[in-house]
Amino acid sequence: MELEYWYPIIVLFGSFAIMLAVGIPITFSIGLASLLSIVTALPFDSAISVISQKMTVGLDGFTLLAIPFFVLAGNIMNTGGIARRLVNLAQAMVGRMPGSLAHCNVLANSLFGAISGSAVASAAAVGGIMAPLQEKEGYDPAFSAAVNITSAPIGLMIPPSNVLIVYSLASGGTSVAALFLGGYLPGILTAVALMAVAAVYARRHHYPVAQRINFRQFLRVTWDAIPSLLLIFIIIGGIIGGVFTPTEASAIAVVYSLLLAILYREISFRNLPAVLLESVVTSSIVLLLVGCSLGMSWAMTNADIPELINEMITSVSDNKWVVLLIINIILLLVGTFMDITPAILIFTPIFLPIANSLGIDPIHFGIIMVFNLSIGLCTPPVGTILFVGCSIGKTSIDKVVRPLMPMFLALFAVMAMICYFPQLSLLLPTLFAPS
């Protein structure tokens, strides 16, 4: 190949790596690297026009409106007392198991993440409640933080999930409802795997079990949490039944969570401006990231990178399971230095055509991508949840690495099951095909 062929590729990845190394935020690194790559093929004014158009057109979608609405709903829930009620329910359900507070952390993250749709919010809200309780019971802070860190991303699998909406956009319109349904079994399997690891660790370190509660107390805790849990059934039931779209469901989630927070009397109209401002800032960051990532996706296509990667992977093997293994290894490496949203937007157009050519269902592949990249949120150097979890748990990254290892092994085992047993992702979408 001529050297000119490699110019856009070298400029794209070289400038991106340099900007990340010098500390430029990833959003601007993606956008500027894309622009520099396009400049190698087009005049500067044309390159500016092209990348601006790609960013604008990419963000001009009704489905993307679900992201700011779900962000707002999650922030309302985070300040409205919902996390504490879900923790109480989780503790009532697993209180007699060895290491009950660790199991409670996993279960509460699964429940709160499923309602808020945010892994970071889940790690902060649930971890903030559980860390003092676990410290009081003599749990190792590093172990407690490891449990919180690895279980927080479960909310990215169990809907509503913003990253599944982003994958739907990047994949060219894969059904959001089907993706939401496809995430349930992998999410539940992840929770079970992490609880199994926690049980072994708790037995080995003789961690205490919680006090037994009577049936009346259990009913009271359950009754207190039911209004929060109903949101899941309202959203998913409405989408599956064709009552409303995922975007409309996100608006309903805002109204419902606000009414619930007022009912619980843990949020007032005086607090709303701060919640709205935080939601606007978060949504702006996410959507700017989406726009810049779509620009990089086009720049990579313009440089023929998808075809180049396709040729490299298929030259190794034409067996779909081997190809899937290679893709998973690449995604694991990508997830260690790139946030999940831009990774999905940039690499879905590259890997999905390969998956389609091998007969892999887009829903199945979407669940694989989201699960795989969510592991990167728990690893340095970009692991957002890792830093939040260590901060909340009042421990350091070097101390949390050792208890994280068996948790990661459990996550890798689940990832292998999701990859090589497609029905884990496709069973519910097949049974409850949205009307």
Image: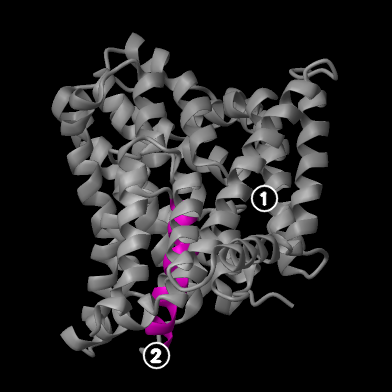
Q: Residues within 10 Å of mark 1 (few under 14, many from 20)?
A: many
Query: Is residue 342 shown in magenta?
Result: yes
Range shown magenta? 340-357
Residue 315: quadrant of the picture: bottom left
Task: Give the Cα distance between marks 1 and 2.
Answer: 30 Å
Q: Amino acid at mark 1?
A: Ile
In the figure, is residue 258 to the left or right of 411?
right
User: Where does the image place residue 100, in percent across and percent down from the top left?
Assistant: 36, 28
In the figure, is residue 163 to the left or right of 434?
left
User: Where does the image place residue 160, in percent across and percent down from the top left?
Assistant: 62, 52
Q: Residue at x 63, y 30 (%)?
A: 219
Quadrant of the image containing the N terminus: bottom left
The majority secondary structure of the magenta stretch comes to: helix
Residue wearing tag 1? 67
Q: Residue at x 36, y 29 (%)?
A: 387
Q: Amino acid at mark 2?
A: Ser
Name which of mark 1 and mark 2 comes first in the sequence: 1
User: Where does the image place residue 417, in percent across and percent down from the top left?
Assistant: 30, 67
Q: Which mark is residue 28?
A: none
Q: Residue at x 38, y 49 (%)?
A: 338
Q: Is residue 397 above or below residue 344?
A: above
Q: Is residue 32 above or below residue 62?
A: above
Question: Is there CB contact under 8 Å for labels 1 and 2?
Answer: no
Q: Is residue 7 above or below residue 204?
A: below
Q: Residue at x 59, y 23 (%)?
A: 217
Count numbered badges in the picture: 2
User: Where does the image place residue 294, in percent across and percent down from the top left?
Assistant: 55, 63
Residue wearing tag 2? 357
**Residue 6 in sight:** yes
Q: Nearer the viewer, residue 247 or 297?
A: 297
